[in-house]
Image (cartoon, grey):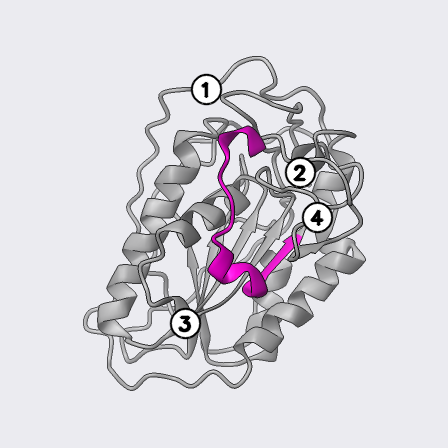
Amino acid sequence: MQGRGAGAGGAQAGGAGKTPNSGKMAMPGDGGAGCSKYVIVSARGTGENQLNPTGNRNVVKGVMSQVPGGSNYEVKYPATTDYINGPVQGAADANRYLAGQKTKCPGQKVLLVGYSEGAMVVVRTLQKIAVPESQVVGAVMFGNPFWKAKMPYNKGTATTGQGSASVQGVTVPKQFSNRVFDVCNTGDVVCTSAGGMAAHMNYPSTAAGKEAVTWAASKVKGVGGTEKAVAGGEKADSGKGHAGAPAGPRGGAGGPAGGGSGGNTGKSAGQEAKKNTGAGH
């Protein structure tokens, strides 16, 4: 597990801590022969490796094993401590990918998943979603720096507080409120601005983390496939566009509370992820 703290109201108007990272998850296969029934667009947290993101793995793996015929796209963005520009870049990449899918696979259903800074990417993606809103079956977020108490879609044990980036005023569009599963637990400094990093790192093993898998799978069950073939599906990015700093020890404190990284130049190549026709890896 890796982790880096994020103080309340961290660098550049709020920050997100690093997310869990253990083991490997293979990238999905190329979807050139046709379109998957649904696609999971997953945004990793601060410091996670582009080619081995694991914060969202339980959801991605769990859904794809329970509901065959899906594919997974990993959002290409820096995932550094630039919490203003990074999520914007991530959302642009996610929507670029979705715009391509809209043409190649019309009607394909979409599930968004984001951990920590990746949750910020999800919210910003929803704000300018590139596919018809009806195609978005759900959005799952863990340790969301944009989290606010008393929202109808909140999950987890936290009931008070607000995220370390809530000062940015970015919120989930109302039309998606019945399709969001926003998990925040008491003691997570990133989504409540109180506590520490331990709670932020443990979502996959919590009750709400496990419930998120069941909820997400229920959202994509029964989704019909599309018949239009994908013409020349692009290969998943195998480069090292990840600009985040090396991982620290799990639950490490400190983090970006005092200064921002600024000037992140991580590429948003946004190439189409490969189709995964089996159970999760």
Residue bearing the label numbered 4:
150
User: In this orientation, which residue lies closer to the viewer: 279 or 179?
Assistant: 179
The quadrant holding residue 126 is bottom left
Q: Is residue 214 above or below residue 258?
A: below
Residue bearing the label numbered 2:
191
Marks 2 and 1, the one that precedes in the sequence: 2
**In the image, which is nearer the foreground, mark 3 or mark 4?**
4
- At a point 66% along the width and 34% down the height, the residue shown is 190
Q: Amino acid at mark 1?
A: Ser
Tag 3–tag 1 contact (CB < 8 Å): no
Indicate the secondary structure of the residue bearing disc 4.
loop
Residue bearing the label numbered 1:
261
Classify mark 4: residues with Cα within 10 Å, few (<14), some (14-19) or many (20+): few
The stretch of residues the image draws in magenta is 166-182
The answer to if 167 sits in the magenta stretch is: yes
Marks 4 and 2, the one that precedes in the sequence: 4
Residue bearing the label numbered 3:
134
Q: Is residue 276 visible?
A: no
**In the image, which is nearer the foreground, mark 4 or mark 1?**
4
With 163 as the anchor, is 267 left or right in this view? Answer: left
- At a point 39% along the width and 84% down the height, the residue shown is 225
